Amino acid sequence: MPAAPEPRPVDGTEPIYRLKADFFRLLGHPARVRVLELLREHERTVGDLQAALGLDSSGTSQHLTAMRRQGLLESRRAGTSVYYRVKDPRTFQLLETAKQILTSQLEETRDLLGGLNPPQSDAAPARTRS
Amino acid sequence: MPAAPEPRPVDGTEPIYRLKADFFRLLGHPARVRVLELLREHERTVGDLQAALGLDSSGTSQHLTAMRRQGLLESRRAGTSVYYRVKDPRTFQLLETAKQILTSQLEETRDLLGGLNPPQSDAAPARTRS
DNA sequence: GAATTATCTTAGAACATTCTAAGATAATAA
DNA sequence: TTATTATCTTAGAATGTTCTAAGATAATTC
């Protein structure tokens, strides 16, 4: 194991832009975004998430551990299973806003391409995958 | 369980959770968070940002380039200077929501420590660095 | 044109994250 | 106790990101 780096403060003296960056970085992985989306309606076990994500137990656990350590998720044990849930509902707002921004970007891209590549149909608006 | 290999299209069929992750990952660096905060009120030149961030021209440019490539920033040239601005105002909403979530987390941490480490004063609410 | 100022680009080193494989732990059931 | 299922942990390899140093380009001024 490599030598432990600078022990960063965990208290309130850490500049907020650093905390924000750490927070966003944690959202910066497809599997972790999907975990949040899967936990939108209700809590789920590690096994559920693992199956839905198509990951192995190790990878799933590592992602969940990172998200819980950061305070994004909470968990409870029930028998041999562990249920995870999102701690702060405003987290979903974050995902929603990001989606809106990305949707605007995609629409803009399509508009630019429109002149070269006219729409095949205007019967229904184009769908994007969720 | 063997990890399922995910498809990697580059066009508009890219799954949205991947786009979201890319988007959040870009927000996941202290310098880039600060750039956004600095651009909250008005556009700024690379030199302005460079001075405010305490980076060199190379690093500053690299961060800005990454943010522009992702569609987070826009730029215009005026003489030898280049002005950068945030493209979508909803980006600030993202920062605001993140701040709220983090603030709640910090307050919760303080409450837990409260028993051991009582508040020094209740005359004014505790401030955090911006 | 040459000099100046501002910004950008590149390559590789340094550093950080993610993946993989193997095994450890925890709760329960047989 | 042993077996079983579910979850977690660890180490190191693979991959990705950021930093540093050097120089390239672009617009302007002299």
Image: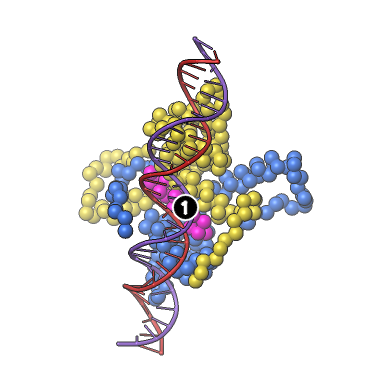
Chain colours: A blue, B yellow, C red, D purple
- Residue stretch in magenta: A18-34
Would you say B86 lies left or right of D18 here?
Answer: right
Task: From the top left corner, tell me how far across and down residue B15 is, in percent.
Answer: 60, 55
**Residue B11 percent across, percent down from the top left:** 64, 50
The answer to whether residue A36 shows anywhere in this view is no
Residue B48 lies left or right of residue B122; in this view the side is right
The residue at 51%/66% (across/down) is B3
> Is residue A126 depicted above or below B127 in this figure?
below
Residue at image x 56%, y 37%?
B87
Whether C24 is drawn above or below B18: the answer is: below
Residue at the (59%, 56%) spot, across then down: B8
Residue A68 drawn above or below residue A45: above
Left or right of A107? Residue C4 is left
Q: Would you identify the image quadrant in which residue B31 lies?
A: top left
Residue at position x 52%, y 47% in the image: B23
Q: Amino acid at mark 1?
A: Leu
Q: Nearer the viewer, residue D26 or B118?
A: D26
Mark 1 crowdedness (10 Å alpha carbons): few <14, some 14-19, many ≥20: many
Q: Look at the image and say whether residue A29 sits in the magenta stretch.
A: yes
Disc 1: host chain: A
